[in-house]
Amino acid sequence: MSYINDVRLVGQLVEAPQIKTSRAGAKYAVMRMQTGRPVKRDGKKVWVFVEHRVICFKQNALPMIERKGEKNVWMKVHGELGYLSGGQSAQIVVNEDQGSVGLMFADVWPDHEITDEEYELVGAVDGAGGDSGGTKTTTDDEIPF
């Protein structure tokens, strides 16, 4: 699914996510994550980091965020770019019906630590992880050629 202000990030949490409750009683997560890229300065490679604010309203991702969200955990986010303060501050918004949030590495959530219920919510995590909605698998019999 793609939309106008489509944003995809892979980054590291700067701190543990804050779990909040809206006036309507719905829980959501506020996360600060950083992304980096290497640049050359004076012939040496250095990393430049940018911090991003991520708001996640996706209810099926909240158990994973609450349980495994902590400083330095690597996550992937697919959301929509939104603006605060009259356009002066940007944030990435993951809505209930659009976007995803997931863990990046299997060692963050080993199979022996995940319950069947959690697996249904976040999917299998292998290597680069899956989306927060689950992981689809395809057998050779399903390939149409």
Image (spheres, helix red, strand yellow):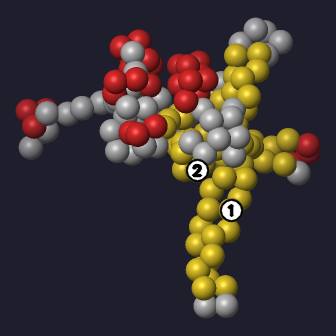
In the displayed structure, does residue 59 sit left or right of residue 141?
A: right
Category of crowding for the residue at label 1, using alpha-carbon neighbours closer than 10 angstroms: few (below 14), some (14–19), many (at least 20): few
Residue 92 seen by the camera: no
Tell which residue pokes out farthest to the bottom in this image.
Answer: 43
Residue denoted by label 2: 11
Measuring 66% from the left and 24% from the top, which residue is drawn there? 57
Q: CA distance from mark 1 to mark 2?
A: 10 Å
Residue at 30% x, 30% y is 136
Residue 53 lies in quadrant: top right
Q: Earlier in the sequence, mark 1 or mark 2?
A: 2
Q: Relative to residue 27, is residue 107 depicted above or below?
A: below
Is residue 53 visible in the rendered structure shown here? yes
According to the image, label 1 marks what residue?
49
Task: Specify the amino acid type for callout 2.
Answer: Gly
Left or right: where does residue 92 sit relative to residue 7? right
The x, y position of residue 40, in whole percent, is 61, 83
Secondary element at image label 2: strand
Mark 1 vs 2: CB contact within 8 A: no
- Quadrant in the rendering for residue 110: top left
Instruction: From the viewer's perspective, tell me whether residue 139 is left or right of residue 112.
Output: left
Residue 44, horizontal then vertical, whole percent: 60, 85
Secondary structure found at label 1: strand
Q: Position of residue 6 (x, y in %)?
A: 60, 46
Front-most of residues 113 and 81: 113
Instruction: Say few, some or many: other residues with alpha carbon within 10 Å of mark 2 (under 14 / 14 to 19 / 20 or more).
Output: many
The three-letter code of the residue at mark 1 reads: Phe
Give x and y (percent) for residue 90: 78, 48
Q: Residue at x 13, y 38 (%)?
A: 143
